[in-house]
Image: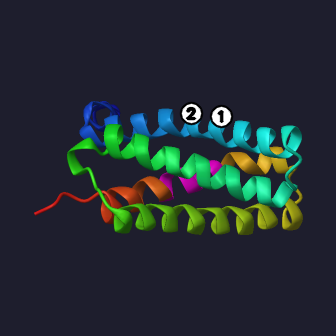
């Protein structure tokens, strides 16, 4: 069991996942920063500010992941960007459903519910990006 864990940590898949996680932390800061600027500094409504924050953070994520995490499988063009953004919007929808289930149905505080939600959406997004978005060109 320990040997399998060590092998996984040494694998390219783990290195990709680690890079993806680091970029995710940065994108969270971009998301919160964009939201705060739009909503609190410029007076944009919270729903539009949230939408803009997600688009800015997801675009940043696409650029960084395309050039760092999935560098060997780098994608270009509008189709690749739209595939990436589609995964993000599906992930947002999934996170909202899970927030309802964990918070409203199971009674967890939203800040606590975000923990399993984040883990699920990060793993799902990484898997879909790795298998369907950032694929090696033939």
Residue 119's place in the image compared with 100, above or below, is above
Residue 118: give x, y in percent of width and height. Answer: 63, 49
- The answer to whether residue 59 is seen in the rendering is yes
Q: Is residue 25 left or right of residue 101?
A: left
Residue 73: give x, y in percent of width and height. Answer: 23, 51
Q: Is residue 45 left or right of residue 61?
A: right
Q: Secondary structure at mark 2?
A: helix
Which label was assigned to residue 29?
1
Find residue 102 and report its image quarter: bottom right
Do the residues bearing badges 2 and 1 touch, measured as CB atoms within 8 Å?
Answer: yes
Q: Secondary structure at mark 1?
A: helix
Give the extent of the magenta segment: 118-124
Quadrant location, the N terminus? top left
Q: Say which residue appears at 49% left-offset and 52% top-offset.
A: 123
- The answer to whether residue 117 is seen in the rendering is no
Q: Nearer the viewer, residue 39 or 15?
A: 39
Please, which colouring scheme is shown? rainbow
**Residue found at the very far left of the displayed protein:** 138
């Amino acid at each position: 069991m320990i040997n399998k864990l060590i092998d996984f940590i040494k694998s390219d898949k783990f290195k990709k996942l680690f890079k993806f996680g680091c970029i995710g932390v940065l994108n969270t800061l971009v998301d919160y920063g964009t939201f705060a600027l739009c909503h609190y500094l410029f007076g944009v409504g919270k729903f539009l500010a949230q939408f803009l924050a997600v688009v800015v953070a997801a675009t940043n994520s696409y650029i960084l992941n395309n050039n760092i995490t999935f560098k060997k499988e780098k994608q270009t063009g509008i189709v690749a960007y739209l595939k990436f953004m589609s995964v993000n919007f599906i992930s947002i929808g999934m996170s909202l459903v899970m927030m309802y289930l964990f918070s409203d149905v199971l009674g967890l505080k939203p800040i606590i519910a975000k923990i399993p939600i984040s883990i699920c959406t990060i793993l799902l997004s990484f898997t879909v990006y790795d298998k369907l978005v950032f694929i090696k060109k033939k």
